[in-house]
Image (cartoon, helix red, strand yellow):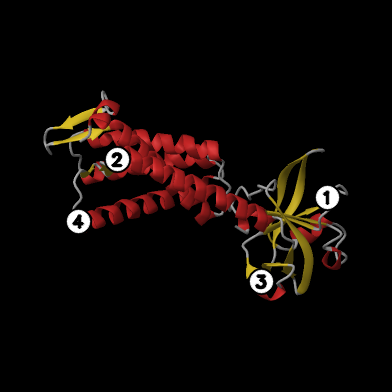
Amino acid sequence: MSRSRQLFHAGCAILKPVIGMVIYLDVLLLSNLWADYALLHAVAALTHVPLKRGRCLLAAMLGAVSALVILLPPMPAAVSLLMRLLLALAMCAAAFGIRPLRLLLRQTVLLLSVSMGFCGAVYLLSQFWQPVGFYVQNTAVYADVSLLTLLIGTAAASAWSAYRARARIRQQSRNFRLRLQIQGICISLPALADTGNTLRDAFTGKPVAVCTANALSAWLRGYPDAVAAAASCKGFRMQPVQTVTGRRLLPLFQPDSVTLCRADAPSAAFPVDLLIAISEDPGITSPAIVPAYVIS
């Protein structure tokens, strides 16, 4: 080991006498921080939930600190699994919030699954490569990589994240068309993918698109009002919505089918699991406002 590395890690090393190796806390915490950060983004992508960078970093820091269990004596498998489950629950609550509860539990199971899959894959590769400085205990993984490798990996991951963010913005700026099948009536209307629409149904956790009453007039004209029309469909309830003009309740329902496509590629429509909220607010300029994260 070089003299510069010894100086940099001064005070950060803990000897594990049982395995005869030194674990550096800076490497342990940093590597687990970025691993947990990536795993949380994977969960966000799988559940189509927006993830704020600050909350994701906070949750990843929580996961990184938990990696210190590697310094404890070996625990029974059941105890390690329980600790991992509670940690996944805490990380998901910190990253995504606690409501709706059903979505939080789903995210917890997904995070636990992908993290265990990641650890298993890393451990399997280690058996083939047999690298020096690799250690697994209490479901925590440690790999004695160099500081330069960590910095290069961080820079590469940050560059990729920035590229994906720009690509997502370009994608969300495109025009889309939302196709609804409601009680035998097919409605196709222009849709705006809006990052400001983060509505989710409190019971099912499904994303909610807001459509204007005028855009749904072909269906609504058979009912006295939007509430009566929504009440005739599956999944009817009143959805609380916060707008610039105040808080209001919008009738919410589940259409028979929902597809979305780019305006310049109508044949490439794909199904989306959306609920529809009906708004009579004249200030809404787009016939339909779809959460942008369902497109990414």
The amino acid type, in three-letter code, at marker 2 is Ser
Query: Regarding mark 3 in the picture, which secondary structure is present there?
Result: loop
The amino acid type, in three-letter code, at marker 4 is Gln
- What whole-number distance in Å separates the C-alpha atoms at marks 4 and 1? 58 Å
The numbered mark, 4 or 2, whose residue comes first in the sequence reads 4
- What whole-number distance in Å separates the C-alpha atoms at marks 2 and 1? 54 Å
The amino acid type, in three-letter code, at marker 1 is Ile
Report the mark closest to the observer, 4 or 2: 2
Q: Is residue 76 above or below residue 118?
A: above
Relative depth, front residue between 169 and 103: 169
Residue shown at the point (71%, 48%) measured from the top left: 239
The numbered mark, 2 or 3, whose residue comes first in the sequence reads 2
Res 146 label: 2
The numbered mark, 4 or 1, whose residue comes first in the sequence reads 4
Report the mark closest to the observer, 3 or 4: 4
Query: Regarding mark 1 in the picture, which secondary structure is present there?
Result: loop
Res 284 label: 1
Relative depth, front residue between 210 and 58: 58
Report the mark closest to the observer, 2 or 3: 2
- What whole-number distance in Å separates the C-alpha atoms at marks 4 and 2? 20 Å
- Along the horizontal axis of the image, is 11 left or right of 239? left
Report the mark closest to the observer, 4 or 1: 4
